[in-house]
Amino acid sequence: MEGSNSAASKVIETKPTDAVIEKQPISPSLPVLRTDTQSITVDDPMGAYVVERTYKIHSAPDAKTAIAFLAHNPVIRMHEYLVVETPQENYGRDISGIFHESSGVPVGAAQLQEFDHGMLVIYAPEGTIRGLWLDQKAHAIAEHTGLTHIAQFSSIAPQGKMIAAIFPKLPVGKYQVELDIRGTPYKHNIEVLPAQVTELKPAG
């Protein structure tokens, strides 16, 4: 309704740029010790290609500090990693979430319950032309407040090999995701969990 001040009329839009990360508050602040790179070959039906993985290495006094830092610093591109070294073990974060670096096993939900936000990644549907998704938008409507969050599809991997709409920091809770696939409305209910990454891969 025009002139309404209800929560349902409010919209928050996320811009698909790396600057999203720079604008996020860092809590706690951990300086970069060093940056490492590694070149790997990726197999692809259209031909293998080389990508460069980037690792930003930080240091923390304990696991709690390391996990808090990673929870507040989402990674929004493939082949980019944050690593935090502690005296006990190292922790990492990539586009899929926070993990124990030695094993690759995700950090358990029990260690993440204190955080009030999570991340949502919606990949361009398989079977569609990925390039056509650039600049298209996805909507995530909060069940509890009616607040609509909007993210734009953009390239998250070298050579445009992967397209996704990313919501780096959504408040924890249930959402209805809405987008348009080849003229057909798509709706899907998801739940965003504390400091975890929810991935949605619609069928084309």
Image: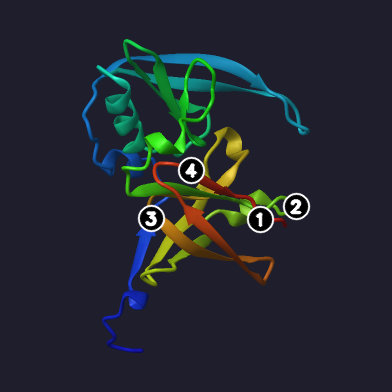
Q: Nearer the viewer, mark 3 or mark 1?
A: 1
Q: Nearer the viewer, mark 3 or mark 4?
A: 4
- Disc number for residue 94: none
Which residue sits at x=33%, y=22%? 63
| Residue named by callout 4 | 197
Which residue sits at x=28%, y=42%? 24
Mark-to-mark CA distance, 1 and 2:
10 Å
| Residue named by callout 1 | 202
Q: Which numbered disc, 3 or 4, marks the residue that appears first in the sequence?
A: 3
| Residue named by callout 2 | 127
| Badge 3 amino acid | Thr
Mark-to-mark CA distance, 4 and 1:
16 Å
Q: Nearer the viewer, mark 2 or mark 4?
A: 4
Secondary element type, mark 2: loop
Q: How dense is the environment of label 2, judged by Cα within 10 Å: few (below 14), some, or many (20 and up)?
A: few
Judged from this view, the residue extending furthest toward the front is 110
Horizontal side of 45 relative to 140 (left or right) equals right
Mark-to-mark CA distance, 2 and 4:
24 Å
Q: How dense is the environment of label 1, judged by Cα within 10 Å: few (below 14), some, or many (20 and up)?
A: some
Residue 73 locus on image (x, y percent): 34, 36
Residue 187 locus on image (x, y percent): 60, 67
Residue 172 locus on image (x, y percent): 39, 54
Secondary element type, mark 3: strand
Of residues 128 and 10, the one nearer the viewer is: 10
Q: Which numbered disc, 2 or 4, marks the residue that appears first in the sequence?
A: 2
Of residues 156 and 86, the one nearer the viewer is: 86
Which quarter of the figure is the C terminus placed in? bottom right
